[in-house]
Image: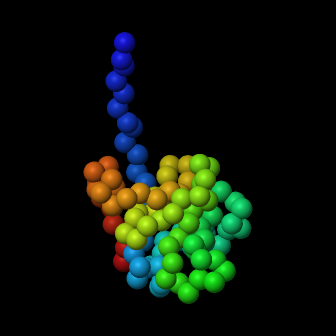
Amino acid sequence: MSIQYRKKPVVIEAFQMTRERRQDNSEWPTWLNIAWNLNWHEKGAVSCEDFPNSKGDDRLLINTLEGIHVVGWDDFIIKGVQGELYPCKPQIFAETYDLVKDNEQ
């Protein structure tokens, strides 16, 4: 017997990481800057792939409960409902999420 379920609608925050945004973090949302400044051993911490030799052109890593996730170019970094961070490929993001409100000024 199979039972069907519908995913509850939730609102998340997300930020698309491009090469340009990686080099210039002036557009990063506050929650991503906070994660960048966490100790790497803390869950939710964000760091660069080539730490400590980064020149600002390498990809980012996220320390999650499931392990280390690489943020590819143009991936979205999602802040989930419990504040957790994880990457999402652009195609999956487009198929899963609709824009609710654009907070960019």
Out of 96 and 31, give the one closest to the viewer.
96
Is 62 situated above or below 27? Answer: above
Q: Position of residue 11 (x, y in %)?
A: 40, 51
Q: Position of residue 25 (x, y in %)?
A: 49, 81
Q: Position of residue 64 (x, y in %)?
A: 60, 54
- In what quadrant of the picture does the N terminus appear? top left
The residue at 39%/37% (across/down) is 8
- The answer to whether 32 appears left or right of 16 in the picture is right
The residue at 71%/62% (across/down) is 41
In terms of image quadrants, where is residue 91?
Answer: bottom left
Tell me, yes or no, if residue 27 can be seen here.
Answer: yes
Residue at the extreme top of the image, as rendered: 1
Tell me, yes or no, if residue 44 can be seen here.
Answer: no
The residue at 36%/27% (across/down) is 5
Q: Position of residue 92 (x, y in %)?
A: 33, 53
- The answer to whether 52 appears left or right of 30 in the picture is right
Judging from the image, the colouring scheme is rainbow
Is 58 situated above or below 99? Answer: below
- In what quadrant of the picture does the C terminus appear? bottom left
